[in-house]
């Protein structure tokens, strides 16, 4: 990546060449070769490394730099600037002003970014509660951070969002295989249903049968979120064989889809019926 004005000023490119098909705009005055995809991570590196040197990549943009896609490619890049920094208005940038603890900041991919633990705690404090729990779970499941240090950091926070950060970290477990699994777990936790065991390994006669999303072992009831990945080639046959193994072991499986999450009362009633049978 390079500043277009720098390249033109040095005579390396003409303005017409810069606007040509060989180069693409990453953000204001920053360009890259056309073969380089303009992702959120690339834009974050351009903003913090070239456009606003001294900025720290924070929030969802920091999560993206740590490998967890909490922001789309065209979402605004979030950076934090020191208090008192002059106001800047740049398209595609959400600039915050705050004092970050020195131990919260590190470097990754050539730019300043909040550490995985600080990134997770900040997201827990600022996102809507369920979204915050989803974000914490995703960062933990990706191996970016561990739950204990995030909870410890959340416990030290004060001010706006600190209470929610502690609540979100308390609800997170890092076991969910997808955001919808986290939302399903939260839905069950707010219902009258007994708490299930997440990522339970079903064993029959000393032999492993399957790992299920949620389980009530005493009732031999499993709850599985049926996501889009189940439509992948060959997945139907594998799912059918897995279901047959669970059934042969005496288990009943309740499948949940995205549509079911929009009808929580009906879903809870269906699970309750399976548990009482």
Image: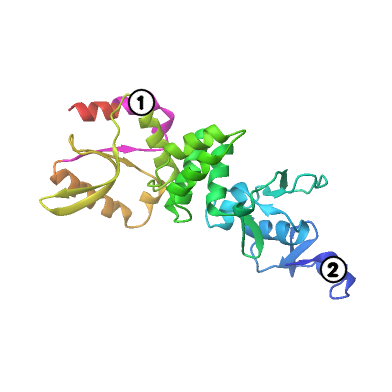
Determine whether 141 is above or below 24 in the image. above
Q: Which mark is residue 191?
A: 1
Q: Which mark is residue 104?
A: none
- How far across and down, in percent of the image, does residue 9 sit? 89, 70
Residue at 72 percent across and 54 percent down: it is 55
Determine whether 57 is above or below 264 in the image. below
User: Dot 2 surroundings within 10 Å: few (below 14), some, or many (20 or more)?
Assistant: few
Quadrant of image for the N terminus: bottom right
Which sits earlier in the primary sequence, circle 1 or circle 2?
A: 2
Residue at 42 percent across and 51 percent down: it is 141
Q: Nearer the viewer, residue 81 or 76?
A: 81
- Identify residue for label 2: 6
Q: Is residue 201 left or right of residue 84?
A: left
Helix, strand or loop at label 2? It is helix
- How far across and down, in percent of the image, does residue 85 sit? 80, 47
What span is in magenta?
251-269
Quadrant of image for the C terminus: top left
User: Dot 1 surroundings within 10 Å: few (below 14), some, or many (20 or more)?
Assistant: few
Determine whether 135 is above or below 48 in the image. above
Q: Nearer the viewer, residue 112 or 153?
A: 153
What is the quadrant of residue 25 in the picture? bottom right
- How far across and down, in percent of the image, does residue 118 sit? 56, 49
- How far across and down, in percent of the image, does residue 162 sit? 56, 35
Residue at 39 percent across and 31 percent down: it is 187
Residue 60 painted magenta: no
What is the quadrant of residue 21 in the picture? bottom right
């Amino acid at each position: 990546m390079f500043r277009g004005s720098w390249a033109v000023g040095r005579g390396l490119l003409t303005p017409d060449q810069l606007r040509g098909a060989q180069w693409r705009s990453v953000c204001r005055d920053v360009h890259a070769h056309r073969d380089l995809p303009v992702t959120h991570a690339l834009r974050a590196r351009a903003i913090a490394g070239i456009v606003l040197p001294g900025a720290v990549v924070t929030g969802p943009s920091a999560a993206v730099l740590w490998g967890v896609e909490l922001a789309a490619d065209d979402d605004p890049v979030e950076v934090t600037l020191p208090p008192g920094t002059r106001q800047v208005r740049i398209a595609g940038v959400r600039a915050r002003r705050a004092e970050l603890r020195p131990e919260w900041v590190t470097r990754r991919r050539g730019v300043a970014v909040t550490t995985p633990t600080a990134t997770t705690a900040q997201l827990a404090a600022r996102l809507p509660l369920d979204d915050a729990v989803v974000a914490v779970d995703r960062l933990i499941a990706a191996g970016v951070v561990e739950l204990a240090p995030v909870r410890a950091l959340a416990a030290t926070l004060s001010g706006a969002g600190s209470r929610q950060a502690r609540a979100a970290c308390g609800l997170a477990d890092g076991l969910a295989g997808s955001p919808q699994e986290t939302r399903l777990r939260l839905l069950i936790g707010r219902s009258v249903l007994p708490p299930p065991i997440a990522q339970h390994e079903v064993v029959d006669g000393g032999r492993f049968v399957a790992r299920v999303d949620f389980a009530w072992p005493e009732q031999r009831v499993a709850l599985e979120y049926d996501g889009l990945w189940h439509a992948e080639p060959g997945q139907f046959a594998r799912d059918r064989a897995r279901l047959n193994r669970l059934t042969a072991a005496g288990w009943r499986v309740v499948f949940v889809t995205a549509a079911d999450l929009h009808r929580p009362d009906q879903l809870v009633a269906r699970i309750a019926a399976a548990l009482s049978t």
